[in-house]
Structures are given as structure tokens and as C-alpha cells.
Image: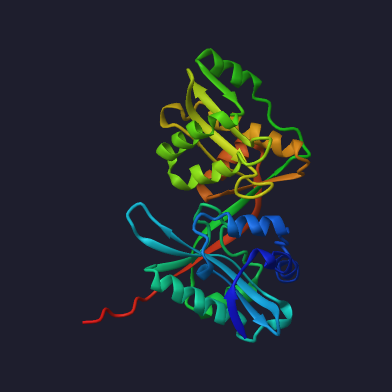
Amino acid sequence: MDVRSLTREDIPELAALCTRALPWDALAPEDLAHGIFNDPGCEDRWNLAACDAGAIAGFIVGALRTSKEGEKLGLVKIFAVHPDRLRRGVAGLLFDRLEEALRTAGASQVVLGSRGPLYFFSGLDPRYTEAFLFLRSRGYEKVGDSFYLAVDLRRPLPDYAALIAKRAEEGVTFHRPTMDEKEEVHEWILSAFGEGWAYETDLAFREALVTVWIARDHGKVCGFAASNATGRGYFGPTGVGEDQRRKGLGRVLLVKCLEDLQADGRSVAWIPTGLERISYYHNGAGACVGRVFWRMGKALSQPPTAG
């Protein structure tokens, strides 16, 4: 069994493998390529394929994230093994290689879950029982829950026209920014919410129709929301400035993005979030829990320092 780095030429084979190995997560080639190669930390050492007789038997995609405090965190973004290659050491070989690379790079721990910018899933879908048992055998423990909320776009969305009019009287307006506003929006998100969300929102400017909405308070950016940025059919990231919170701006921006997804022909919009935000999205747009994920993690022991 040979292990090598993934290339863009592998994407069709990876998509076919996902269709077989991940029945709840068949990923289109363009979505796989987006999540792997548009990651700002994309490196060959994190993205690996195990090959048997020239065919990909399994693959793993990882990343190295650094916190504001400088702590390095390893991330498993996605992994899959072809059903015909199960219990042959494929997953173990891939995890050995990725964990060693992350350890060498200084990561103190590794998690399977959401740590942006750009991730595929918020953790492990517990319906993949064999994957859960495999992770447990390697020392991974459940460290939390995450959720994908679903909004049924076949139903009418909330009408916030009255709220928009009320905010307009106070000097707050909403609009889709143009490419000329991209740098301004980027800088505001960077200062208010950090590099990850700024990078992800930049991705929503890549198409002819920008899938970002912003709020301005007397001309100054005070809130934003994006869709089709982290993945097609997904809402987020989103945020409102501290001095404008609890005034309904987030709900307006949410529905504006959902209307974009509706116009794009989507029947459902997915909102990755945590437990504390479920009520917000349910009240704001009728979102319901569609999927539950378990965040899994473990410490990476560091080799002793010489001398």
C-alpha cells in the first residue's frame, strides 16, 4: 500500500469513493476540490491517498490551524475508505501519516470537527458507527456536539419588510455589496471577527453574483452574512457588530441569504451551528435540526526534546 499526496486529478475518483463510502455525504467533485484546495493552509503533507494497485483505497484531508494565542491544532477534515478495502489497515495507515505530520509541525492535539476556514463537516456523524469505533480505538474521545440546521426553502421565508423599514428610519440599510466593496467588507470582518470568517466571506465574492449581504449604519459596515461560501447550499459565516446586536439585523441578513439559495434552486439550506444558536435560527427562519455531529479529539504526545 503506497501513500502519496492528493492532486486535483484525483478529484473524480475521490468523489466516486465518497459516493460508495459515505452514503449520507456524497460530495460533488467541485465541492471536494473547493474544500481541499481552497483551504488557505492546503499542503501536500495534510492531504493523503492510500493507493493499492494504482487505485485509491482511501484518503484523508487534514489541516493545521493556529489559535490567536499561537497554539497549533491539528484537524481531520474528512476521511473515507473504499468499502472493498475495509479492515485492511488503510485508515490506520492514513491516520498514522497525518498524525505524525501534525505532531512534527507542533500540533498539541488533533480534532475531527469544525475549525475554519473551510471544513467539510462539524464532526463525525454517529451513524458511521464503524468510523466511530475506529477513532475510539486510536484514542479519540467525544468532546462535544455540533449541528447542521435545515431550512426548508420550498416554504415561504419570513417577511422582514417592516423590520427593514424600521431600521432604515434609524440609518441602517441592507444591500448586496459589489466587488468594489470587497476590500472594505473584508477589513471590517477581519477586525470584528478574525481572519477565518474574512477569508470564507471572500470566497462568496468569487462568482458573478456575489452571495454576501451587508448592513450599513449611516454608511459604515455593521453586519454581514454569506452563503455558498464554505460550500454550496450552506449559510454562513455571519456576524453583527456589538453595538447593533439584538435589533434584528442578523435575521434580515439571514433571510436575504436564504432567498439567494432559494433563487439558486436549492430545496434546503444548511446552517452549521452549535447548541446555543439553535433557538436563534429556529425563531429567525424556521430552521430545524437536520443532522447531529460528534466532535472527536485527542492529544498528540510530543517526542522528548534532545539534551
Question: Which residue is found at the position 65% from the left and 31% from the top?
Answer: 256
Viewer-nearest residue: 307 or 79: 307
Determine whether, in the image, residue 83 is placed left or right of residue 248.
right
Answer above or below: position of 120 versus 261: below
Residue that lies at the very extreme toward the top in this rendered image: 169
Quadrant of the image containing the N terminus: bottom right
Answer above or below: position of 147 versus 179: below
Q: Quadrant of residue 16?
A: bottom right
Answer above or below: position of 44 versus 88: above
Tell how many labels.
0
Viewer-nearest residue: 229 or 138: 229
Question: Which residue is found at the position 77% from the left and 44% from the top?
Answer: 267
Q: Quadrant of residue 25?
A: bottom right
Chosen colour scheme? rainbow
Place of residue 278 in the rendered image (x, y in percent of width and height, measured from the top left): 57, 45
Place of residue 195 in the rendered image (x, y in percent of width and height, measured from the top left): 44, 46
Viewer-nearest residue: 54 or 199: 54
Question: Which residue is found at the position 59% from the left and 53% from the top?
Answer: 147
Question: Which residue is found at the position 55% from the left and 53% from the top?
Answer: 118
Determine whether, in the image, residue 83 is placed left or right of residue 191.
right
Answer above or below: position of 39 versus 206: below
| Res 215 visible | yes
Place of residue 286 in the rendered image (x, y in percent of width and height, measured from the top left): 66, 39
| Res 121 visible | no
Place of residue 154 in the rendered image (x, y in percent of width and height, measured from the top left): 78, 39
Quadrant of the image containing the C terminus: bottom left
Residue that lies at the very extreme toward the left in this rendered image: 307
